[in-house]
Image (cartoon, rainbow, N blue to C red):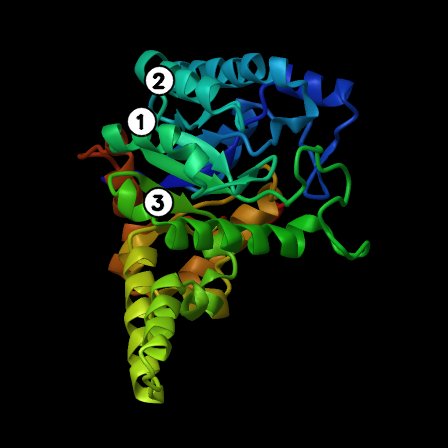
Amino acid sequence: MDPVIDVHHHMFAPHLMAALAAAGVDRLGGELVPASWSPEASLEVMDRYGIDVAILSTPVPLQFAEPAQRAAIARGVNDFGADCAHRWPQRFGFLATLPLPDVRASVAELCRALDVLGADGVAFLTNHAGLYQGDSRLDPVYAELDRRGAVSFIHPTVPSGEAMPIGNAGSPLAALQPSLLEFPFDTTRAVANLVVSGALERFPRIRHIVTHCGGCVPSVANRLIDRRPLVATYTAMLQRGEAPSPERIETLMAEAQDEASRRLGTLHYDVALSSDRHVLAALTGMVPPSQLLLGTDFPMGQEIGVHVTLGGLERFEGFDAAQRHAIRSTNPTRLFPRFARTGETPPPALVATTPGSVS
């Protein structure tokens, strides 16, 4: 029986929690860091909701530490992830944390994590101290991932530059936590830069996962185009004394949008905390269900996030039973084939129905 795989599930290593506490950091995106998390706590929730495997990642910007300390922190996080995967090999995989924006150190840690620790891919943030996905300075990291055909998981943070985003930093409105709007906005910036920069074309073997149904990408997909060829053509026509017709400009824009759509269709999108019917309708208007993956955002989204995400996935009328199964199982198994298995008893229902099961 195909396993149910949660590709968006977080871990918080004890040494990282201690370092965050020492730096006075107790929130990420305005949300409290789950200080009481443990692998056993994840397993309890996973069992309650019929989730067989969780791919662990750490969504913490490392700007809180001095540059010289970041590589050691990343190594410790990855050693902890490897230990979880070793202790529960059928239940946990993990995605390596990199000490970005230090590219050289990140390439070294990437190789160690994948070759020595057995990481299942790499976890990025949308930006690392202002260094966004798609930036050419990341090419050495992308080249190593592309050579291996590795998984890249892109988790949102806020635009903060070198400073660590503390409290509600990153949100221009004090009443709105950064995770509410700035996370989907920054996801959209990162995806836009991957598309427009040509990084997806230069490194086509990287298998990218974008979280939370792509943030705002489905609603602005027609704007995520590289306008430079269009502007160059338009300018050249004017210099020749030609008047570009609306039909010609419309054709050029349609070609650019088709190319952007093709590139967006190569990405995978998890549904963590984003299984509202309107969001899923927008996303599936852009990409087919074969590009969608189950994610829960536990423990940041708490158990209620697991419950709501899975419930929304079950209720969405745009999916049939086979597509729901693919999102939960066969789609993520293509990215993480070591968890594929057959001949097992079907897992329990995805949405817990016993009273008191949701916190």
Mark 2, residue position: 111
Of the numbered discs 3 and 1, the one sitting upstream in the chain is: 1
Place of residue 186 in the rendered image (x, y in percent of width and height, measured from the top left) = 57, 51
- At 43% across and 17% down in the image, what residue appears? 109
Q: Amino acid at mark 2?
A: Cys
Q: Residue at x 66, y 54 (%)?
A: 180
Element type where label 1 sits in the image: helix
Direction from residue 242 to residue 194 in the image, left or right:
right
Residue type at the position of mark 3: Ala
Q: Is residue 119 left or right of residue 165?
A: left
Residue at image point 58% right, 16% down = 73
Closer to viewer: mark 2 or mark 1 = 1
User: SS for tag 3?
Assistant: helix
Whether residue 89 is visible, yes or no, is yes
Give the residue number, with chain letter if any, for mark 3: 199
Rendered image quadrant of residue 282: bottom left
| Mark in front: 2 vs 3 | 3
What residue is drawn where x is 53% and y is 18%?
A: 74
Q: CA distance from mark 2 to mark 3?
A: 20 Å
Where residue 167 appears, x then y in whole percent? 77, 40
Residue beneath disc 1:
144
Q: Nearer the viewer, residue 61 or 16?
A: 61
Q: In 3D space, how far apart are the residues under numbered discs 3 and 1 (Cα atoms)?
A: 13 Å
Q: Secondary structure at mark 2?
A: helix
Q: Position of residue 50 (x, y in %)?
A: 41, 41
Q: Amino acid at mark 1?
A: Glu
- In the displayed orientation, state which residue is furthest to the front: 240
Task: Give me the disc on residue 234.
Answer: none
